[in-house]
Structures are given as C-alpha cells and as structure tokens.
Amino acid sequence: MLPYTDKKPVGAADFYFAINATFRFIRRKLGPDGLVKYWTDLGASYFEPVTARWRDAGLPAVAGYWRDFFSAEPGGNVTVSESEEEVILDVGTCPAVAHLRAGRREIDPWFCRHCYFVSDAMARPAGMAVRISGGNGSCTQRFYRADPDVPAQDLDAITSCA
Amino acid sequence: MIGCYDFCGHYDWTFAWLERQGGETLLRDFWKEAIGEDSQRHAAELIRDERFEGMRKYWGHTLAEEGAGYTVTSTPDAVRIDMHECPSKGFLLRNDLAFSRDYCDHCIGWIGPLMQKAGFVIDHEHNHCGQCWWEVRAAADSTPPSAPGEIASEKDVRLGAAWESPSHDLFCRANSVEQKESAVVKEQIP
C-alpha cells in the first residue's frame, strides 16, 4: 500500500528526468557526501510512513509496498517475490533507467546507488536491511530482517550508469 | 527507489531540504539549473527554436501527461495558460503534504530564467490552492496583462469561484522568483 495516492493510475515518466537532474545538481553543489546525505535523509524522513508500516507489519508489508509501487511506475518490468525470510525484487527493466535512456539523458553515474541508500534508511528503523546487486537498468534487491552476520552492502556491487 | 508516481511529494520535500542546506540561494539555483537547464532542457530547446508554438507543444504534452485541468489560449503576441486544477499542487493538497515554504514558487523558479534566455517575460498569479494563470510575451512587448476574460473568455481561471483564496502571489513582467511583486493576503471571510 502506498502512503500517498494520486488520481492518475501511473506517474508521469518525464519526472525521472528531474530525479536524475536533482542527483547531478546535489553532487555538484554539495559533493558525494551531500548526495548520500540527501538520500538517507529522504529515506528516513519523507518515507517514514512507509517505514512505520514495515515496522508494524513486517515483510508482507514490504512486498505489498513494492508491488503497489511498481504498478504505479510506467514502463518497468519488476517481479516481487516473498518468503518468510526475505522479499526479493527482480528488476528486469528499471522504469527510470529505461526512460532516461529513451530520452537520451546522461545518467548520473551513482543513480542506482540511490536505491540502496534510500531503502536502507527506510528499512533500518523497521529492523530490516537491504542488499542490492546489479544496476544500470536491471538489478536484484533483497529485503530481510536485519542480521549482523550478513556482510555490509558492497557499493561496487551496484553497477554504475556511466 | 524514488518513483515518479509520488514525485510531487518528494519534490516538495527536496525544496525544504535544499533550503536547509544552502538557504534560498541554493533552492533558486536548483530550480534554475537542475530543473530549467537540465531536467527540462527539452522545453528550453522547443521554446528557443519554435517560440510560441514551442510553448504550446511543450505544455500540451506535459500538462496532459500529468493529468492537469487547464486551457492554453493563444493570441498572435501571447500564450496564456489558465490552470484550473494543478496536478502538482493538487497532489500535495489531497495528501495533506506541505514541506516547503511556497511550493508554487518552483514553477516561475525554473520557467522564468528559461523564458528570459529565450527573450520572453511572464505575467503570473497563483492562489496556493491549485489555480494560476500565466501570460507570456516577448520581452520587447510592453502590453500589460489581460483583464479577466479578455483573452481566455469563460475559461479564464480568475472568473471561477475557486479563484478566491486568502493568499495570492503576483508576478508582473517577471523572470524570477525574486520579482514577486506582491503577496496579496486577503482577509479571511468569517
């Protein structure tokens, strides 16, 4: 379930241009650390209503959120699967990267890292963690209950869009 | 992932975040540079190359995709937009979101400098409730903004019951947020 709803069934894809441009602007003005701070603040603050549902309802709420999320994004191909241990997003076609490529936009090289930093900031207060592999148009994202034995995210495992 | 479905929500949140990091200057730079010169560069190119026809093409595509309730009216010397149901501000109002000081300023924040580069000036007024109007003319054209109904007839947003609100912002022959001439705060009717 999404915390905010619109009258349109799906969003306007050209907004991906603004999201990508925002990352580029913040990196240029505030540096790489500023960009990571933006993503973590966004995940912890703007997405707090999502975190609250994940905290209350656990992994089924995580799966439900991402199913509803990707059904409202135009042009993607994403499968959400869940078990008692984890929720897996198999992103065959990332709607954002696909639209940016179709629009011949230069994609911020760290574009795909935003998924990790935003989702991590959403998941941590709910007692969960996320790990991502791949990127640049297709990736796998795993959400699970936080486990100190799982290695930290390897940022080099998230493919650059450069 | 940050999505486009609730874009207006995190866009508004981002305005407030940027202002906390670098004040009004950083926020205005964001509208001008990130949105006007990068994200919406297709609009800049259309308007630079095709002038009024480029404006009609750009807003015809964008506002339809966003699901706006609007009309575009053209004269030989101006393009006028009457926004009856802003999809962007409407999203915030329906979801009870208000992160930044004045969300509506972002439009002239990126459109104003873009129009200046292309040689146009803007008359504009918004009521913070999802209604606004725009008139774009060549910078050399000193024609004042039209009277209500003069260009858009019954489609002029100023003639509708929804137009009245406690706070209107007005811009005359403007190209930037700094040119906000008056914040007209009307008395609340008890």
Image (cartoon, coloured by chain):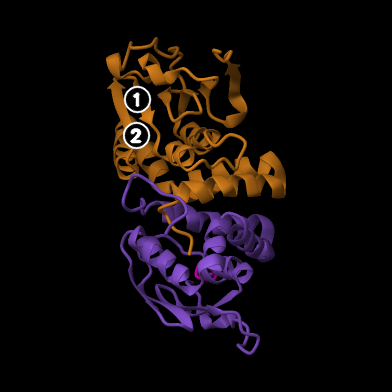
Q: Image point 58% across, 58% down: which residue?
A: A48
A24 falls in the magenta region = no
Where is mark 1, residue-wise? Answer: B79
Position of residue A125 relative to residue A103, above or below, is: below
A42 with respect to B46 (left or right): right
Where is mark 2, residue-wise? Answer: B55
Q: Position of residue A148 (x, y in %)?
A: 65, 85
Asked whether residue A71 is in view, the answer is yes
Chain painted in orange in the figure: B
A10 with respect to B141 (left or right): left
Label 2 to label 1, Cα distance in Å?
A: 8 Å
Position of residue B154 relative to residue B129, above or below, is: above
Front residue of A51/B133: it is A51
Mark 2, secondary structure of its residue: helix
Q: Please identify the residue farthest to the front as the structure is shown.
A: A56
Residue bounds of the magenta highlight: A110-114
Q: Amino acid at mark 1?
A: Val
Q: Residue B180 lies in what quarter of the image?
A: top right
Marks 2/1 in contact by CB < 8 Å: the verdict is: yes
Mark 2 and mark 1 lie on one chain; the one further toward the N terminus is 2
Front residue of A116/A88: it is A88
Q: Image point 47% across, 43% down: which residue?
A: B95
Chain painted in purple in the figure: A
Q: Amino acid at mark 2?
A: Met
A147 with respect to A17 (left or right): right
Mark 1, secondary structure of its residue: strand
